[in-house]
Image (cartoon, helix red, strand yellow):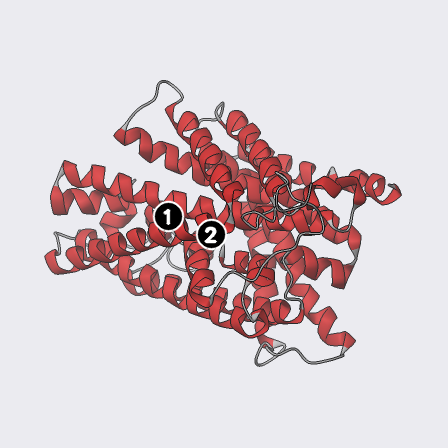
Amino acid sequence: MDSTSSPVGTAKSAPQTLLSVPDGMFLVIGMVIGVGIFKLPSLVAGNTAGEGQFLFAWLLGGAVSLCGALVYAELSSRHPETGGEYTFLLRALGPGAAFLFVWSRMTVIQTGVIVAVAYAFGDYASEVLRLGEKSSAVWAAASVIALTALNVVGTFSSKTLQKLMEIVLISALVLLAIAALMTGGSPKPAAAAAGGGGASFGLAMVFVLFTYGGWNEAAYLAGEVRDARRNMLKILVAGIVGVTALYLLVNLAYLSSLGLAGVRESKAVAADVMRLLAGEKGVVLIAVVVCMSALTTMNAAIFTGARTTWAFAQDFPLFARLGAWRAQGSTPANALLLQGAISLVLVWAASYARDGFQAMVDYTAPVFWIFFLLTGVTLFVFRSRGGEAPVVRAPLYPLFPIVFCGMCAYMIYSTVSYALADYGPKFGNMVLTGLVVMVAGIPLYFLARRK
């Protein structure tokens, strides 16, 4: 049976360059704009001293992300293959670091993010239709199954749905912002933030950068983007600039309606704005928008996550079946199915936590930033080796890579110290669980190398 008729394809099938620059931009924007913009502005406001500092934090988050995007643009130009960070780590730091990254991505980082967003979807979907005592978990599991199945069907179906959902989401956010800015509200006078704007501004940036998280996922598309060596820079930069502009617009709308003090006190800032604009019916509407946001993020995460596993399976025969590329639909079907299965296990585990979304954020954050830092280091390794210059080079080298790596190191420190100081041992145990699962990949690597 040839690969075109096989249900899973063969390892000889390869990714096709089906993605244009707009396709890549939609995937980047969909991965970044998630539930964070609906959940985290209140925490950012609570750790900033005034409206100017609040807006500056969002602008700074975009600038820092742009530094990282310039680093990733050069890395993707040097190695425009499907696999993203796995490819960069493999070529710069060796198979051990690359293997540990993919293991962590399969079991902690990507699947944890997918499940965190699935729970956010479940929380808001339950406001529209509640499905029993564990409604959020039921909705989360259903969304994982449905979107994994869609991605198994093929790249064209996945990217088309992504575009449609993203257009609806961006339109809804823009309309919300314009309505809030035009209508205004009765903003409360802002009191000084507790602790002033000094040390707490760093904590505000933890939440801002979490909200910007996901732009790096575009690196996994390099093997499927037309003329990737040139177009990856356009995709990354345009995606981040677009997200930054939208975030500033939405946060201006929040301030216009509620004021900084109102944003600080809000538990669901977008819902409170809609309540002012359209009453309780508006709350249901914003719940639907948040669900749409969560689905776009999940779809992009599922799409890109399986591509790392596919690339990794090409190098480790022990996992050869995960390296099968299904020619019909051009998709890594086996890797998608494994990713979906792990995600469902995490949905089940998080169903016993008080907050499934928070449990998965606790689980993933430190491991994510560790490998982000190591990926930034790979650019210094490639530059030190010399060789042919790539089409795209990070400007003002080494300034942007240093800023990016410094941000990653700070986030590792911040996520762990904030978790232990603010949430206590229970939160710390969740952080430790993610790190233990990451380290468990070390003996597995030696087993895979022997095979």
| Picture coordinates of residue 181, whole percent (x, y) | 17, 60
Compared across the picture, whether 76 is left or right of 89 comes to left
Residue in the image at 40% along x and 47% along y:
296
Residue 383, picture quadrant: bottom right
Q: Which residue is mark 2?
A: 156
Q: Amino acid at mark 2?
A: Phe
| Picture coordinates of residue 94, whole percent (x, y) | 79, 57
For the residues labelled 1 and 2, say whether their Cβ atoms are less than 8 Å apart: no
- For the C terminus, the image quarter is top right
| Picture coordinates of residue 358, whole percent (x, y) | 46, 36
Compared across the picture, whether 233 is left or right of 241 comes to right
Please say whether residue 409 is visible from this viewpoint: yes
Q: Is residue 389 above or below residue 40?
A: below
* Outermost residue, front side: 1
Q: Amino acid at mark 1?
A: Leu
Compared across the picture, whether 18 is left or right of 284 comes to right
Residue 217 or residue 6, whichever sits in front: 6
Residue in the image at 78% along x and 42% along y:
442
Q: Earlier in the sequence, mark 1 or mark 2?
A: 1
* Outermost residue, top side: 133
Compared across the picture, whether 219 is left or right of 126 comes to right
Residue in the image at 27% along x and 57% along y:
250
Q: Residues within 10 Å of mark 1 (few under 14, many from 20)?
A: many
Residue 248, picture quadrant: bottom left
Q: Which residue is mark 1?
A: 40
Identify the element where label 2 is drawn: helix
| Picture coordinates of residue 123, whole percent (x, y) | 36, 32
Please say whether residue 402 is visible from this viewpoint: no
